[in-house]
Amino acid sequence: MSNLAHQIVEDLKQRILNGEIAPGAKLPGENSLVEEFGVSRTVVREAVSRLQAAGLVETFQGRGSFVLEVPDRTPGLRAVRSHRDVLDLMDFRIGVESEAAGLAAVRRTAHQLKGIARALDEFRRVGDDPARSVEADFAFHLKVAVASGNRFYGDLISELGPMMIMLPRTRLDPAYEMSDPDHLTRVVHEHENIHAAIERADPEAARAAARVHLANTRQRLMHVEGRSGSE
C-alpha cells in the first residue's frame, strides 16, 4: 500500500510543482483519484495525508483538499500553516499594503492606473472561479504595490506571490467563499474603493480603503477563530 500511495504522491506533487494544479485549486476528489489510479480509498487517503504533511495541501472536512504549495523563492510563507500565522500575515499586509496604496495615489502614472483598473475588471470577471480569482486578486494588489513608485513594495508583494491571497482563503468559513454572491460583491466593492482613491489621487483615502479591505479579511478570519478556537 505504501508504494502505491508513494506513486500517487509523486504524481500529484509533480502536477502541483509544474503548475498543472495551481495554488488555490482543489485536488481531484477521492472518487476521481480512486478511478484514475485504480487503487483503494485507503491508499488515496494515505497519499493525501502525505501531501498534507509535506505542506503541499490542506484538507477541510466537507470541502476537499486545496493546494498550498509555495514557490521556493518565498521560503517565509512555508511556515505559515496555523490560523495564528495567517492572522499575523494579515497584520503584516495591512501595514505594508496600506502605505503602498497611499503612495500609489500620489505617484502612479496614467499607465499604472490603467493597469490597476484592468486588474480590477479581471477580478470582477473571474471572481467566482476559485483558482483564477486567486491570481486575479493577487494581480490587483501587485499592480497597486508597483504603482507606489517604490520598487521595494512591488518586489515584496511579487515575492510573496499568490499564496498571500490563498493562505487566508483556506482558513475562512465557507460563507466567505468567492462563490457566495454577497461576499464576492463586498470584496469587489472594497477593491473598487482602493482603485477610486488612487484614481482621484487621495493618499489618505487610499490608505484607509486598503486598510479597511485587509482588516475586513482579518475580521472574517477572527470570526472563524472564535468559532473553532485558535490552533
Image (cartoon, rainbow, N blue to C red):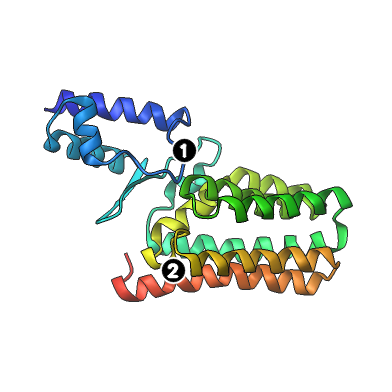
Q: Is residue 102 above or below residue 53?
A: below
Q: Nearer the viewer, residue 120 or 12?
A: 120
Residue at the spot 78% in from the left edge and 69% down from the top edge = 197
Mark 1 or mark 2, earlier in chain: 1
Residue at the spot 76% in from the left edge and 74% down from the top edge = 205
Q: Is residue 114 above or below residue 194?
A: above
Disc 2 designates what residue? 221
- Label 2 CA crowd tier, 10 Å (few <14, some 14–19, many 20+): many
Can the viewer see residue 209 in this picture?
A: yes
Residue 170 placement: quadrant: bottom left
- For the N terminus, the quadrant is top left
Query: Residue 231, position in %: x, y?
Result: 32, 64
Q: Is residue 149 above or below residue 70?
A: below
Tag 2: residue type? Leu
Circle on res. 119: none
Disc 1 designates what residue? 22
Residue 7 placement: quadrant: top left
Q: CA distance from mark 1 to mark 2?
A: 23 Å
- SS at mark 1 in the image: loop
Tag 1: residue type? Ala
